[in-house]
Amino acid sequence: MAFLLILSLLALAGLTVTLVGRRMRRGRQVRAFPELPTPTFKVVALGNSGSGKTVLLASLFYQFRARPGRPYYLDTDPSTRVWLGSLLSTVVDPTEPWPSATRRDGTRTYRFDCVTQVEEKPTTAFTIEYLDYAGEIFELLGAGDTALDNLVGEVTAADALIGVLDGRRVLQFLRGQAQGRAYLIAKIAVMVQLMARARCAIYLVISKWDLVHDFGEPAGADDRTRLEAVVDALMTVDHISDLVRSRTTVRLIPVSAVGSGFARLDESTGVVTKRPDGTFAPYNVDIPVAAIVPDLFTRVRQSMDSQVVGAIESEYRARRRHTPDEIVSEMGAFLLRPAGVALRATLDSVMSRPYSGEVVAMMLDWIARPSQRKDAELAAFRAEAHRQAYTLLEARTVVLDDFQRMLHRLEHDLPASVLSR
Ligand SMILES: Nc1nc2c(ncn2[C@@H]2O[C@H](COP(=O)(O)OP(=O)(O)OP(=O)(O)O)[C@@H](O)[C@H]2O)c(=O)[nH]1
Ligand SMILES: [Mg+2]
């Protein structure tokens, strides 16, 4: 009798577990994913016509494709994906001419979603808005031109500026040729003036790094030695050294959209031609985009004293107890408390545009990373809605950590790339 009772109790318990499990699974399917709003970061690419901005853009989109071993990738809308893909295939095909220059009406903003896997579902961790100008504009601009006003508006609202210096012109400058001097002193003046007006981080990119050879460097000089020589030469140009001195974050990043064995410079005509048997191997093209968010957040953290950072960490722990829908609305309340007021003052001084709750939420998560790690195990026991939001926050941290690693590698390999910090 007792045996039968135990048996039926076990059966009842088994049925209950099965039913509850089924209901939970069903609930999991129907419950909407708790969306955390996506932070957006704005970057503007500046540079004279022919400096290599658009080819760089196509190459960097390719570099950030989904691939094994990287927990994230950049995605965009289907038509842009097709357009960047065909642009890249034109670049890579040695039998095709280089793509034509961007027409003035071709200036446009690209939206790149940084996609990570959250609970096996592709989820946007944050978005990068990338504005690619037709370089022609820098030569045609005049005072009172509305295009100039628009450009100034975009530049002052940016979270980062990419200033492309044409590697071919830099090579001429290093060789002491007049055209190179005219380029660095006069041609890029409008771009440098614009960058001097903004408060955000500046990434000076030397494009076409594959061509920057034979300017008197030691035989067999590596990238590190060549970049040191380039920095020494650039710092002799007053408006560039003034810009570097007046700013907190300026990096100099040598990039090649195609790699070292792909193209060659015809010294007599100055034309860049593709080698018939060249290999396409982009160099550093992903760095300027990877640097934006870690550099921005680092600047904010470095501008705050340790008490505020401590307060943010405890605030972060408290926030763990709330539901994901409350995370962003909580920001309003936090920003009114003393640590929040201090954070706002820092953001006002570091960011050049009004910041959104999403950016603040992402930044707080990044600042409080150590305590986030400690919460990792706890998260497994929380309500599913909370756990998914938590996993998204963690996925963002994984992306930022990978970006940070890329920056550390750059600084290690090319110390001269840090112009100011
Ligand atoms: N060797 C070499 N040449 C490059 C590289 N990137 C671009 N070029 C050359 O530079 C040319 C101009 O590149 P674009 O990307 O179209 O220049 P842009 O800055 O977008 O110019 P606009 O659209 O006129 O503003 C290309 O057609 C190539 O000939 C590179 O990484 N290496
Ligand atoms: Mg272009």
Image: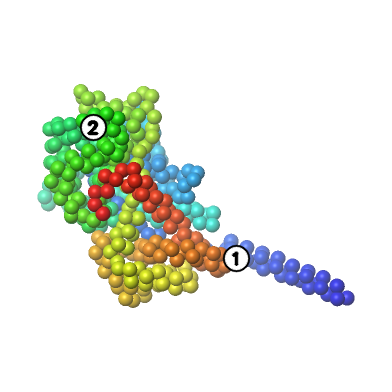
> What separation in Å lies between label 2 and label 1 (alpha carbons)?
66 Å
The reply, left or right, for residue 65 in relation to residue 188 is right
For label 1, the residue is 27
Q: Quadrant of residue 104?
A: top left
| Vertical position of residue 229 compared to residue 27: above or below | above
Q: Nearer the viewer, residue 368 or 353?
A: 368
Answer whether labels 2 and 1 touch (C-beta < 8 Å).
no
Q: Residue at x 28, y 64 (%)?
A: 303
Residue at 30% in and 68% down: 305
Q: Residue furthest left?
A: 143
Quadrant of the frame with the N terminus: bottom right
Q: Is residue 108 left or right of residue 16?
A: left
Compared with 115, 307 (above or below) is below
Q: Is residue 133 visible?
A: no
What label does residue 83 carry, if any? Answer: none
Bin the neighbour count of mark 2 within 10 Å (Cα to Cα): few under 14, some 14-19, many 20 and up. some
Residue 393 location (% of width, % of height): 45, 61
Residue 185 vs 345, above or below: the answer is above
Answer with mark 2 or mark 1, whichever residue precedes in sequence.
1
Residue that mark 2 sits on: 217
Residue type at mark 2 is Glu
Q: Position of residue 292 (x, y in %)?
A: 32, 53
For label 2, the SS is loop
Quadrant of the rendering where the C terminus is positioned: bottom left
* Badge 1 amino acid: Gly
The quadrant holding residue 40 is bottom left
